[in-house]
Image: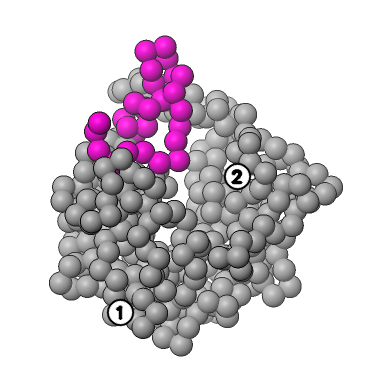
Amino acid sequence: MGRREFPKVHFYDHDLTDMYDFTFNRIRESWKKGTEENGFQSRYFNVPTADRINQFEACLSTFFLVYSNRTFPAHALLDNFYGKQEPNGAIRGEYSEKNGLPVIHKANPEGVQPPLFAWAEYNIYHKVGMKKRIKEIMPALSAYFFWLEKTFRRDNGLYAVPYEALMMPNSPRKEAFYPIDFNTQQAINALYMSALADILNDKESSYKYKKAYFSLKTRINSLMWSEKDRIYYDLDKKGAQIKVKTAASFWPLLAEIPNEVKAEALIQHLSDPRTFGLDHPFPSLAASEEAFDPRGYGGRGSVYPFVTYMIIKGLEKYGKFEFARECAIKHLYYVLEALHTEEGYTGNLFEAYSPVQE
């Protein structure tokens, strides 16, 4: 393959390889140019109909754009946000494409979203390279990390953020004050900040972030793990576990938070048809929950591709490669079914999918 040649996938099922080619071709329609008014990058990826950029979507998008063999610039999506960082380290979750100003909602006054920049940058480095970039962006990532810590960490060492920051709309988690996913995402942030510091051979910074990671890991395991139910839960304002099983409970796998015993118990839920092991893995809400809707209905059971990706990468951390591959292929066939009609690829790619076969 030439240096700039677009990568090809070789797989026994040509429907899936055709879908791969089709979706990457669709990506070509989604590039925009920054303006003097918004101050964005000269070329960046975003939904064509969107009027704002979204931090969470930008970070996740880099995980497929890195496979374009530099045909598409993955880093530009993140640079849009670094360019808007405030003196106190804050980076808001959304910025207007019209004027580049933060788009703030009353329910989420700080505009915080899942802190995945460091994880995304680590992945870009290992797929694309550019050690120089890591050195350039570390000050911004560090300032952002400590803004999160100063703004959202409470006396118990856990982070409290608004429901709107969790990116799981309609999920029955309104009472969550210390959400399992955001706390784990900040642990992931610390884990990969340490890894980025290691790339630069910055031992002092690496130790600092490892310490922050282990502090969160300890608190998540001691406060959010239910030995009885074998799963992690959100906590309410008083620190009591909220006994609602959601897909957010599996972020700790990606962060390598559970030990082998806890991980085995947690992973069993993913193959249990009573909870998360449905025909289409993995629903956002366990099938055993009263609020579960077989049609999906957002956070009431829909299968979100980003959640599936997160869980699959978490399974890989614990050596569950065969199970991860099986679930990934199942998910791809559901995506294919929605995209492929009798007339060809005339369907759609969706943000979320039904958890059960209709």
Q: Amino acid at mark 2?
A: Ala
Between residues 2 and 338, which one lies in front from this camera angle? 338
Residue at 43% across / 83% down in the picture?
A: 157
What residue appears at the point 23 percent right and 56 percent down from the top-left corner? Answer: 290
Quarter of the picture holding the C terminus: top left
Q: Is 331 colored magenta in this rendering?
A: no
Residue sitting farthest toward the right? 36
- On residue 240, the disc is 1
**In this view, which residue lies farthest toward the top?**
343
- Measured as percent of width and height from the top left, residue 250 is found at 31, 59
Residue kind at label 1, given as amino acid type: Ala
- Please tell me which of labels 2 and 1 falls first in the chain: 2
Q: Is residue 68 left or right of residue 34?
A: left
* Magenta segment: 332-358
Q: CA distance from mark 2 to mark 1?
A: 40 Å
Label 1's element? Answer: loop
